[in-house]
Image (tube, helix red, strand yellow):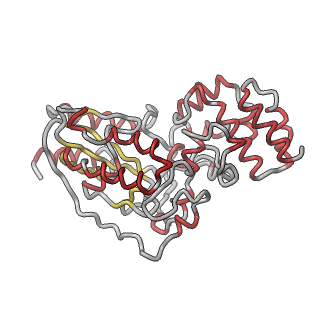
């Protein structure tokens, strides 16, 4: 490892990252083969996985880039409001990627400036990255990918990954010290409510609850996995929660900025009465996988959760939703009334 690579890695650790590695841009090439394998295994998900080919052939899209700096940061340190557990996935509650109030986000900006001050061209795409983040972290030896497809270090899978393209060829590769999954263990596969995890290291996004409740799920009354979604409104943590390698890995030692305050406005009932301006300006800025034009999905998903675990207290809210300004919400509420014989 060169002195420059050592400087970059040391700076990352000083700024709160758990790990930092650097790989040559060519090491991302094998990701395309993995995508091809996924499509062969799950042909119905071809459209979804084809969108990920943008993470390959970085030399074509970013000819100036020579290496990838990949960093790991723990988010499994934040206090999660009890009533949001099992409703909104923890990653999205403690999502630092766009949250300017987060110290982690500010440290990310400082780290980027540090690399630029070293004379490097360093660029980051803060939503989903320029490249396949888990693959890059795997190639840098920062950890392993387990059967549930999540990236793990010694601290489990409650991690955020960030990557920068830089214009100098460098390497800083570790040897992972994490035990691989036991051949006998299939807890994540057995626990997956919709069987999206049909076999190890494979995932059908068309059945994934996280995908259905965010990017997909535009016709919830006719959604194949509607009942399997259970109480989830945005995302899903099941395959990570049941993983033995995540046992005791979450330490609620810090408060995530503004999360406690926001949580007071969130419940199934409160979602159904949320003003659309609040959904568009407050909820969408925090939970940005649902676009502004689609914030009605919050109400549809909340009604679905109510139906899946019905309580008499939900009745008035479902009836209230029959007069919602959005036709999708009215349709879902009317479906729920018929389903529950209200």
Q: Is residue 198 above or below residue 46?
A: below
Identify the residue at the far left of this view: 2
Query: Residue 169 occupies which quadrant of the picture?
Result: top left
Identify the residue at the far bottom of this view: 184
Left or right? Give the position of 342 relative to 164.
Answer: right
Residue depicted at 49% across the width and 53% down the height: 253
Residue depicted at 34% across the width and 34% down the height: 125
Left or right? Give the position of 67 relative to 244.
Answer: left
Across the whole image, how many numbered discs are drawn on residues?
0
Query: Residue 146 occupies which quadrant of the picture?
Result: bottom left
Residue 14 % position (x, y) = 28, 47
Residue 18 % position (x, y) = 33, 53
Residue 243 % position (x, y) = 50, 65
Residue 250 % position (x, y) = 49, 58
Residue depicted at 58% across the width and 44% down the height: 212
- Quarter of the picture containing the C terminus is top right
Identify the residue at the far right of this view: 342
């Amino acid at each position: 490892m060169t002195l420059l690579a050592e400087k970059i890695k040391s700076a990352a650790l000083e700024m709160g990252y758990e790990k930092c590695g650097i790989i040559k841009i060519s090491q991302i090439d094998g990701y395309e083969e993995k995508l091809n394998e996924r499509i062969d295994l799950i042909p119905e998900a071809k459209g979804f996985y084809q969108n990920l080919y943008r993470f390959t052939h970085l030399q074509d899209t970013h000819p100036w880039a020579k290496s990838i700096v990949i960093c790991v940061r723990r988010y499994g340190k934040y206090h999660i409001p009890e009533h949001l557990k099992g409703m909104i996935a923890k990653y999205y509650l403690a999502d630092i990627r766009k949250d300017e109030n987060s110290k982690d986000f500010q440290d990310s900006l400082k780290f980027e400036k540090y690399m630029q001050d070293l004379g490097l061209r360093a660029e980051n795409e803060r939503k989903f990255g320029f490249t396949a983040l888990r693959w890059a972290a795997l190639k840098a030896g920062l950890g392993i990918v387990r059967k549930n497809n999540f990236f793990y270090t010694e601290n489990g899978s409650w991690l955020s990954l960030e990557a920068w393209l830089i214009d100098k060829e460098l390497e800083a590769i570790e040897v992972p010290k994490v035990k691989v999954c036991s051949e006998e263990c299939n807890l994540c596969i057995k626990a997956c409510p919709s069987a999206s995890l049909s076999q190890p290291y494979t995932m059908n996004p068309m059945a994934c609850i996280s995908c259905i409740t965010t990017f997909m799920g535009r016709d919830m009354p006719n959604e194949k996995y509607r009942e399997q979604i259970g109480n989830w409104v945005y995302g899903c943590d099941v395959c990570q929660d049941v993983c033995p390698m995540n046992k005791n890995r979450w330490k609620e030692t810090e408060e995530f900025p503004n999360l406690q305050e926001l949580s007071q406005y969130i419940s199934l009932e409160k979602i159904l009465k949320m003003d659309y301006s609040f959904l568009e300006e407050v909820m969408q800025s925090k939970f940005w996988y649902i676009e502004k034009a689609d914030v009605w999905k919050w109400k549809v998903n909340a009604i679905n959760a109510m139906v899946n675990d019905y309580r008499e207290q939900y009745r008035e809210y479902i009836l209230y939703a029959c007069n919602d300004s959005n036709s999708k919400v009215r349709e879902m509420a009317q479906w729920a009334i018929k389903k529950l014989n209200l």
